[in-house]
Image: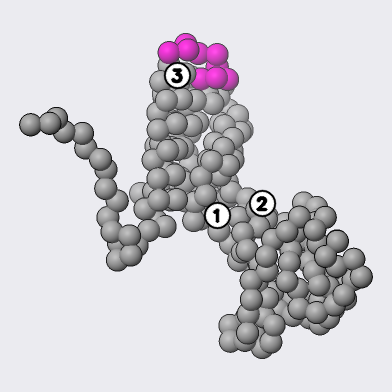
Amino acid sequence: MSISYSNFLTQVRDYTEVDSNVLTDSIIQGFIRNVEIDVANKVDYDDLRKYSTSTFTANNKYLSLPADCIIVRTLFVAESGTLASGTVSYLDKRDQTFIREYNGSNATGVPKYWGNWDDLTLLVAPTPDQAYPVQLEYIKEPPQFTSTNNTYLSTYAENLMLYGTLTEAFSYLKGPMDIYNLYKGKYDIEVQNFGLQQMGRRRRAEYDDGVPRIKIESPSP
């Protein structure tokens, strides 16, 4: 269940007991964005996973990244045919210094290694000798919760968004430390719970892994 953007802003002002003259829409939007970025840095959640297909350029050892790419997860190439039905292989990640040494002669062929060149470019080796299809799997920049856009966090992690925004708000207002610590503690717990859900339970299959079990201490008889 998601909360509307306007209701969320009202909720933040109700908790902090201030009006829109103190916490304007743009100020609260900044708090929300800080929370979204913080959560994305701490939790590898599925909504941020994205895929992009393109082709290498023959005799060009560089591959441009999508503008919203934050972290590259994997890269695989169709050695023959297409990505859907051809012979495909995953490239191994290496440091750019290894790649330059490995392919000092600028040999061409099917790329085998990739590394980060800069924030928007990858370096591969060997240099592609033709326009091989390639798929990039990556972590995208977190979307923004706004008046025109609900996000995964605003829809499925409303408490996390609320407590994180309140932590930002009470820090901005220089409110009582006990209230700040209260919401900071609640936010930290929600981030932990969200991480357990996204990186734990959602990455498991009951058929293979069984149901997660929690150890319960019991006194000796």
- Work out how far the residue at label 3 is from the one at label 1, CA to CA, in angstroms: 29 Å
Residue receiving disc 2:
70
Task: Provide the secondary structure element on which disc 3 rests.
Answer: helix
Of 166 and 37, which appears nearest the observer? 37
Residue receiving disc 3:
181
Of 97 and 74, which appears nearest the observer? 97
**Visible residue check, residue 146:** no
Q: Residue at x 44, y 31 (%)?
A: 188
Tag of residue 15? none
Q: Is residue 221 magenta?
A: no
- x and y, in percent, of residue 112 in the image: 73, 71
For the rendered model, the colour scheme is: one colour
Mark 1 neighbour class, 10 Å CA radius: few under 14, some 14 to 19, many 20 or more:
some
- Labelled pair 3, 1 in contact (Cβ < 8 Å): no
Q: Amino acid at mark 3?
A: Asn
Q: Amino acid at mark 1?
A: Leu
Residue receiving disc 1:
48
Q: Amino acid at mark 2?
A: Ile
Seen from this angle, which residue lies furthest top? 176
In the image: residue 49, left or right of residue 1: right
Mark 3 neighbour class, 10 Å CA radius: few under 14, some 14 to 19, many 20 or more:
some
Task: Provide the secondary structure element on which disc 2 rests.
Answer: strand
User: In terms of image quadrants, where is residue 16?
Assistant: top left
Q: Main secondary structure of the magenta part?
A: helix
Seen from this angle, which residue lies furthest right? 105
Q: Is residue 177 magenta?
A: yes
Mark 2 neighbour class, 10 Å CA radius: few under 14, some 14 to 19, many 20 or more:
some
- x and y, in percent, of residue 127 in the image: 83, 73
Mark 3 vs mark 2: which is more N-terminal? 2
Q: Residue at x 87, y 75 (%)?
A: 107
Magenta residues (range): 170-178
